[in-house]
Image (tube, helix red, strand yellow):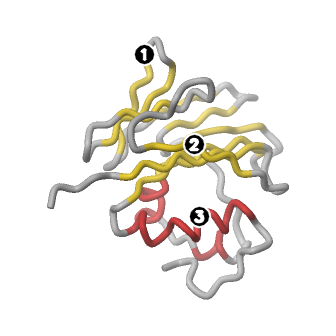
Amino acid sequence: LASAGKDVSASPFLAALAEREEMVRNGKLTTIIFIRDKNAKGQEVSGYIDFAHRLKAESFEPYFDFKRKLLPKPVDLSFYNWETQTSTSNHTPNFQVIADNESGLLFKNKRDRKVINVDPKAKPGDNSRRIEIVDKQYTQIVLYDHVTRRKT
């Protein structure tokens, strides 16, 4: 685990990710991370990150060591740069992006085909919960935990 032995108590956000890392890596939980903050150029960016996909794609040790700040990228589930108005969305091995729906942005879990609704005014969906994290390092953070049921 990238978070093993790391003291992340100074960051409620990193502590929440460390708490989920093992379950996400072993496939019992999928977590979508919503982040809104400023990038290195001072531009406001926001996006939805598939935590499991990012854990496989890159090392998380620099984040858990406070050497890098986790921010959405154009390759994540969804990315928006508010200054340049650049918008991207991408399917991941775990989620399909449904962007043309009247309900707004939805993510469909590819394993159990359940839909996660990220609209704060709506219920997140079956086996899902929305958790707002207050962390002074970020403008806004919301985690969407989805427990995947595997047939045994």
Type of amino acid under label 3? Leu
Q: Secondary structure at mark 3?
A: helix
Of residues 78 and 23, the one nearer the viewer is 23
Q: What residue sits 67% from the left and 66% below the top? A: 14
Q: Is residue 41 above or below residue 4?
A: above
What residue is disc 3 on? Answer: 17
Q: Position of residue 11 (x, y in %)?
A: 76, 66
Rendered image: mark on residue 114: none
How crowded pointer 2 is (Cα within 10 Å; few <14, some 14-19, many 20+) is rated as many
- The amino acid at mark 1 is Asn
Indicate the secondary structure of the residue bearing disc 2: strand
Q: Is residue 128 above or below residue 125?
A: below
Q: Position of residue 122 (x, y in %)?
A: 55, 25
Residue bearing mark 2: 130
- Could you tell whether 97 is left or right of 19 in the image? left
Mark with earlier residue (1, 2): 1
What residue is drawn where x is 31% and y is 49%? 93
User: On the image, which quarter does residue 53 sit in?
Assistant: bottom left
Q: Nearer the viewer, residue 94 or 16?
A: 16
